[in-house]
Amino acid sequence: MAEEILIRGGTIVDATTAGRRADVFVRDGTIVEIGEHLDAAGALVLDAEGCAVAPGLVDIQVHLREPGREDSETIETGSRAAARGGFTAVVCMPNTNPPLDDAAVVQSVLARGREHALCDVRAAGCITKGRAGTELAPLGELYDVGVRIFTDDGDCVSDANVMRRAFEYATALPGAVIAQHAEDPSLVAGGHMHEGEWSARLGIPGRPAEAEIVIVARDLALARSTGGRYHVLHLSTAGAADLVRRAKAEGLAVTAECTPQHFTLTDAQCAGYDPVYKMNPPLRGDADRDAVRAALVDGTIDAIATDHAPHAPETKAVPFEEAPPGMLGVETAFAVGHTELVGSRALTLQALLARMSWQPAAIAGLGDHHGLPVAAGSAANLAVFDLTRSWTVEANALASRSRNTPWAGFTLTGKTRHTILAGRPTVIDGEATR
Amino acid sequence: MRRHLLSVDDLGGRTGIERMLELSESFLAVTRRDIPKVPALLGKVVVSLFYEDSTRTRLSFETAAKRLSADTMTFSVSTSSVKKGESLLDTVQTIQAMGVDAIVVRHGAAGAPHRVAGWTDAVVINAGDGRHEHPTQALLDAFTLRRHRGGLDGARVAIVGDIAHSRVARSNVAIFTQLGAHVTLVGPPTLMPESLAGWPVAVSHDLDDVLNETDVVYLLRIQRERIEGGRFPSLREYSQRWGLTAERAARLKPDVVVMHPGPMNRGVEIAYDVADGEVSLITEQVTNGVAVRMAVLYDLLAADGGPDDGAESARAHGARP
């Protein structure tokens, strides 16, 4: 029997329309009809009255901790959180244990995703073996099993020659992109928060903004000389935003992403020494935060990614300097973006969705299945958002196996109502279907 | 509400600082008696939770607690379950379960006492956290200076050395300036904090310049490890430019005093003889440390009902040793 869904009464927002009121009929994983007052026949009806119906969101930087730290998150729990956040695709970072520097490990992650996940789970691969920064990982083999984003995320590739060779080599792999966690290790060694007024006052060793700027500047020079494609992960400084803006004007193949926390929160959050506000790159000062937001608005930054980084409670119940960096993000990202950017009229809803759906899908090479216009013939990867729904974030109410959200207590406007992955609902009325 | 001493800010501004210095004065009198002990904290339990090595601070707190008749327990990382991987949280909860009134915390990470304060019902006293603060050191230094010169209003204090990594510097800048002193930070640019926004201080990189116009020279410990981080080239070069050498000491105006929180590197930031010379208040700092810590423990533990009459209560207790 055919699997049919009718999304009734919503307003479609996608790359082609900023708002068109229509029902959406899905059959066997594909959108088959768009129109007013469609007949449900025997289909499962999902009410979308007053809601936005959009392509599913795409998060190109998540840590689902599998394999290695299944106590803090699994592909199943993390993808459930992502589905509840409106995501239909996520790209897992390769800093697992073992790391994703081997095609067999990547295939096992993808297989686990197909079997257990509530999202389309894709994998980024390492640039270097063991993320050690010295020898190239088997980029071609990783590419052949589906990897498009290569990064040693968490560890910056600091050796300029290794980075140069990675750029060069990857030009033989169409659609591959070299993504960098841009923090010069020598400048951030021993540091735990943004270096500035707050770190000086709190006595917490700092990680200066220049650590990001010098790496982005160097990498852009290498991208220019090699013709390589470059993506800046979680960009966090005004200086790096300026460099990317100029590189784009010059025509280099460069893209960038930022996280909701970097365009919303600042290092002042660290004043109480709560490690839930610790991440790399660190929360910065007001000027950098505002510059990141401006770069997101003017298109310098292409995508919002969450860097969803679950950590088991005991690892964060320690002094700030001893805690691992990282924050939860997938379940709150749309709501934060909607509240902060659409609510302040910095972005339209369509522009926000561009940065959370079709633009990141294009960066990750997922554009044939995700971020597509909500039109007949498109793969049915969809999210329905209730834009007027106000809710207060509670760490314990999130689907992640960990609780390290920096948004606990924040009241946000906009919430995922339904999510549909390949024509099947993963979330109905805010609750995961499994 | 439970009060802690995590930072100089917790003292309540100039009024609170001066009240604590007054209270310290009455406890200094106690320490000078034949039997330097009062029953003020009889039945109270004070635990020293030291994750870093310490001689003077730990002994000073324990002596202070004993002179107030509190029971003391010492937690030392090297002989505890921390060796077996027990976390700070679990350690604190274990100590708490035994029933303690105050935990004196020394830790290598900034903010560790703040975390502890969130996990326990006991009073938490910061005995030094990373490069953040060391509020009782600041109190004893202010107390020593006040006794020596009657007050800090208008005093010109030069704090010399590794400001960036110094919890003493952060606490002392706060307390000295709140008491009306003018503070100048002196040292190589590489040992200054990354930002001085909001710090009510002047900065100089020329010690000789500053020594001509200073009343108090406060020297900080210089650590050899900083050379590896590129902060300065050698101890010799540091000593020549920023050390209080015998030559520099000889040029000091007659009423200038020299202080150091210890432990000293004689021959680096301070010449051997200068440390023991007439200008030095270093031994007096240590003596005063006990009285100041008695005042802090008393204020936080005994004065539950009314902190306002702390000094009077102390005298009352002192009247029947």
Image: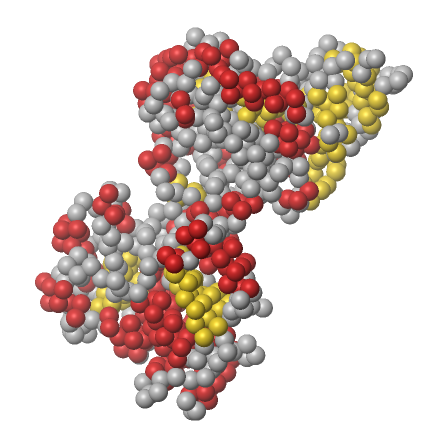
Above or below, comparing residue A33 to residue A325 in the picture = above
Residue A197: image location, x then y, percent = 41, 49
State the quadrant of the N terminus of chain A: top right
Above or below, comparing residue A112 to residue B132 in the picture = above
For residue A25, what is the image quadrant? Answer: top right
Q: Considering depth in this image, is A217 or B299 the residue closer to the camera?
A: B299
Residue A286 in the figure: left or right of residue B67: right
Q: Considering depth in this image, is A371 or B29 the residue closer to the camera?
A: B29
Which residue does the image show at 57% across and 38% down from the upper left?
A: A71
Above or below, comparing residue A266 to residue A364 in the picture = below
Which residue does the image show at 38% across and 75% down from the upper left?
A: B64
State the quadrant of the C terminus of chain A: top right
Residue B229 in the figure: left or right of residue A3: left
Which residue does the image show at 79% across and 25% down from the upper left?
A: A10
Above or below, comparing residue A66 to residue A200 in the picture = above
Residue B77: image location, x then y, percent = 39, 57
Q: How is the image coloured?
A: secondary structure
Residue A173: image location, x then y, percent = 46, 9
